[in-house]
Structures are given as C-alpha cells and as structure tokens.
Amino acid sequence: MNREAVAEKYQWNTGDVFLNDEAWEEAFRKLEKTDFGKYKGTLNCAENVLKYFKAEEDYEVALLRVYLYAHMKHDEDVGNTKYSSCFARVMTLFARVGAETAFATPELTALPEEKLREFAADKRLTDYDYFFTRLIAEKKHVLSEGEERILAKAEESLNLSNEVFEMIDNAELDLPEIEMDGKTMRLSHGLYSVIVNGKDREKRKEAFEKYYSAYQKKLGTIAATYYGNVKRDIFYKNVRKYSSCLEMALFGEDVDEKVYRNLIESVNEATPVMHRYMAVRKKTLGYDEMHMYDIYPSLVEDAELRLSYEEAYELVLKGLSPLGEIYAGLLKRGRDERWIDVMETEGKKSGAYSIGIYGNHPFVLLNYQQTTHDVFTIAHEMGHSIHSYFSNEMQPYSKSDYKIFVAEVASTVNEVLLLKYLLKTTTDEKLKKYLINYFLDMIRTTLFRQTQFAQFEEEAHAMAERGEPLNKDNLTELYYGLNKKYYGDAVTHDEQIGIEWARIPHFYHSFYVYKYATGITAAVAIANKILAEGEPAVKNYFEFLSSGCKTDPVSLLKIAGADLSKKETFSSIMKEFENALNEFERMN
C-alpha cells in the first residue's frame, strides 16, 4: 500500500514536532552553532555547574526535537534519501556535541568527594541530586581526564565487534533457498521466524536445518567476533577497576547484584515446571519426538483475534480500564490526536516501537495486521508511550529518562492486564485455551529464555576472565548444556541448537537480556496488585510511571509493588506459570 492511500487518521502527525521540513531545517541550522568549550575548567562551584547544566539541557531538548522529526520521517520510508540524509546529519551533530561536552564528567569527578556532596545537597542543584549521588559512587571508576580522552578515542575501535556481527548477520550470511507456497525464496531472518511458528512441521524442520547450516559455516568467525566483544568488556572492567564484567554492567544501571542472583536462582529452581510444559506440549502435539523447531507454534489452531484496528483499540481500552479514567484519557488522546502511525506501507520501517522525547508527546509506529499479536502490540507500545508521557510531564529533564532496567515494565503490565481481561470475559473455550498458551509462551520466551541467555553471557564472560579463550567449540558446548538444562528430556535437543548463541544480536550489548526477565517478573507482580487492590495500587503505579530516573530503578519498582530484592517476587511469577499450565492441562 502506498502511504498516500492511507487515511490521515492512521498517520502520525509530524506537524506536532515541526510544521514542515523548512521549519526543521531552520531549527537544525541554529543547533550547528555550539559553544560548550567556554564552560571547560569552570565546573568548581554550584553557580557555574548550574549554568552549564541548563545550557546543555536547553540544547539537548532542542536537538532531540530535531532528531525526533528526522527519525519519524525517515521511518515513514527508509528508502527516502532526503530523510536518510537528514537523519545522518542529526547523528553527526550528536557525535560532535558529545565530544564537545565530554570534559564535564571527568572534570566533576576530579573534584573532592566533599565538594560533590555539597553539590548533591545544594537546593539550587536539586534536579541533579541523584546525578551527583551516582557520580560519587562512580568516582573510583573514572580515570583522569587524559586517560578518559584516550578511552573515548579508542571507543569506536573497541566497539567494532557489534558492527562486524551485524555485517555477517545481515549481509554476508549465506542463507540458502527454500520452497514456500510453490515459489523458491531466499531464507531470511523474518521468513525463518514465520516458518518455525507455522503449522507445517516438515517445513519447520527444513528451515531449522538450513538456517543453522548457514551459521555453522561462519561459526569460527562469529566466535572470534563474540570473543572480541567479551575481551572489550574485560578491558573496560580492568581499567575501571570492577571485580567482574557483570558487576560493571549492573553498576551502570544502579542495580544490586542480589536482583540478578534472585532471577538466576529462581528460574533454575523452576526449570522442572518448564520441563513439564515441554512434556505437555509434546503430548498435545501428539509427537513421539519433539524437536527444538516444534516448540514455537501455538498449540491451539485457528483461534486468532481478527479485529480491525478500531475494534482492537476499543478492546485495549476495555482491557486497561483497571488503570482508571486518566490512563484511558491518554489512550484516547493517542488515538484521536494521531500519535500513532498505524498501517504497513511501502518502504516503512518494519516492526513496532514507541518514541518519546522531553517537551513533546510520544509517538508510536505500528504495522497493524489483524492478529492477536498485533492487538497486544497496541497495548505494549502505548504502555511505553504513557510511561514516557508521565515521566516527561512530572520530572525535570535531568530525571525524566527512565533506565533501560524498567523500560519494559509498563508495556508488559498492559499486556498482562489485557490478557487477564480476555481470559475473564471470553466465553469461547478455544480462544481461552489459545490465550493461556499465549501466556505460557510469553513467560517461556521472556523469562526462561532470556534468563538462559543471561546465564550463557555470565558463564562465557567468567571463562574469559579466568583466561580461557572462547572459541566455537566451548561456546557451543556451553550453550547446548544450558539448553538441555532449561528444556529437559521431553525435547530432542538437536545438535544445531548448540549454535543458537551465534545468532543472538543482544549478546553484543552485554548483560542486557536479563532485563527482559526482570521486567516481566515486575510487570506480572504489578498487574496482579492492581487487579487485587484497585485504586491504591493504581496510585502507586502512577507514581512509578511519573518517577523517571529520580532514584535507582529497583527502588522505583518497589513503589509500584514489585520488590525484586525478594525472591518471593520471582517465585510468584513461577507459580502463575504453573497455575496457567495446570489450567491448560485441565482444558486438554
């Protein structure tokens, strides 16, 4: 479909950012003139620090607005060279300004701790008290200005592993051809996902074997690339004086290691329930042997929700009604004021996302299809958007950007509330069974699978930290062992699954994946509290949504009713998984 054929009400309104391209160009040219160098060497008193912070913030807010417009116009048609160029210009400006302001953190960190504590307590700098609290904690890990400058210059080279992997994975992977619907097609990442989630078992097997054969041919190179990524982490760990790469990653987000340990231990203790789910899946499918390519398709066929976009949005409104009128009002604003780009069109960026910047309402990109998944995607992305909306409205710029650790919580709360609404209200037994299976697989993929990934990362890093070189053989052996541990004896562990590690792009952003698992754990706890307690829990949840990054993320989740420092919170979602499995078995 051409974009011109899409009704205006289904297109996001970029005019809420800039009226037109000319207005964007004028704003961009003003931002090209910068003068942050005049603040260098002055950040030794509260008055000067405040002047610098305010100047930097005013500039960043304006730059983010320019970024937002270019980003959105680019994603409307990724092949449009005009907007690709605009986006590239913005990113170049980001890099230039980043280099110009790189002096600030080392300069502040070099101050005596007593001075930094004065800044943290100074009422004029209240908006930055958490920043200074973190700066004090980070002080022992920040090097001298000269050393930091060297690290900054080396950063591009040290981060090449990710670029190399993306080149292999997206351009140089020799994926074979496969027959689909009477046509010969080149297997791709997207097509592979479609096939392994499909009904045709022989086609799943063929795609699985062909897909991993392509990675097998590149396995030595990918292993060396990943080892380079791990060695980069070890380099930073050593020069910044952390005890481990894991400690360094958790410290960066101000997350207590106890949370990570609670996750790993709780999921490992719950693997027998996952093994049981695999056995139930095998029995339901009626297979003598269930392979790894059999664990993806829904166990309930032809029970999809096939709704128009309008019907889907109304369903989301009903499902999220426990969050109250204020939340419903924002959902309606998003729809009616064109925050959302709805339809799939030629050249449009695939997938879905929410983007929110300070000083502007958020936007959502969809490519809506009439599937159950896409109904939940509306709820998910609007969860991100409303989280951003509240944080930006209620916090100063310096505290508005919530950490990645909590980024998936609000979106998943919405999904859980919608799911529980559907389970409660549907009279269609087949649909109910489908939704329970949907929930089981949501927990399997987001909690168990991501924790398996996290455990692989931790153990791979630990091996390298002990001086063991990483290679295709020991990485594959490590991953294969974890796969058997997580999925159990009901699954035939195909040899190819041992190299699944080689296709996971998140591994090049070390210790990122565990946040998906803690996120769904927190979200289920919060959703259950909202449904059980009503208004008091909603009030606490809104406080969380409005808190940005005013303190550490684990403390913010406690406000909303999810205490990840306690193992019971993790045990609770495991129990929910088990209860859903019991109900699914009862309905079989």
Image: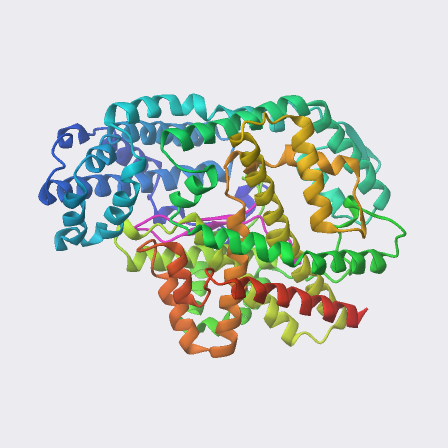
Give the magenta range. 351-373
Q: Is residue 355 magenta?
A: yes
Q: Is residue 464 magenta?
A: no
Which residue corresponds to the image point at 58% horizontal and 64% vertical from the top-left? 571
Residue placed most toward the observer, 13 or 324: 324
Residue 206 in percent (x, y) is at 82, 36
Q: Would you say 559 lies left or right of 34 here?
A: right
Q: Quadrant of residue 26?
A: top left
Which residue corresponds to the image point at 22% horizontal and 39% vertical from the top-left? 56
Residue placed most toward the observer, 530 or 501: 501
Considering only vertical position in the picture, is 329 above or below 241? below
Query: Can residue 9 be seen by looking at this rendering?
Result: no
Q: Quadrant of residue 299?
A: bottom right
Which residue corresponds to the image point at 78% horizontal and 61% vertical from the top-left? 300
Considering only vertical position in the picture, is 408 above or below 238? below
Query: Can residue 368 be seen by looking at this rendering?
Result: yes
Residue 251 in percent (x, y) is at 39, 44
Residue 141 in percent (x, y) is at 32, 36
Image quarter in which the C terminus is found: bottom right
Residue placed most toward the observer, 426 or 491: 491
Image quarter in which the N terminus is found: top right
Q: Would you say 319 lies left or right of 294 here?
A: left
Name the residue furthest right.
Answer: 288
The overriding secondary structure of the stretch rendered in magenta is loop
Residue 35 in percent (x, y) is at 17, 29
Q: Would you say 242 lies left or right of 298 here?
A: left
How many marks the image carries: the answer is: 0
Q: Would you say 26 lies left or right of 218 here?
A: left
Name the residue furthest front.
Answer: 466
* Colouring chosen for the image of the structure: rainbow
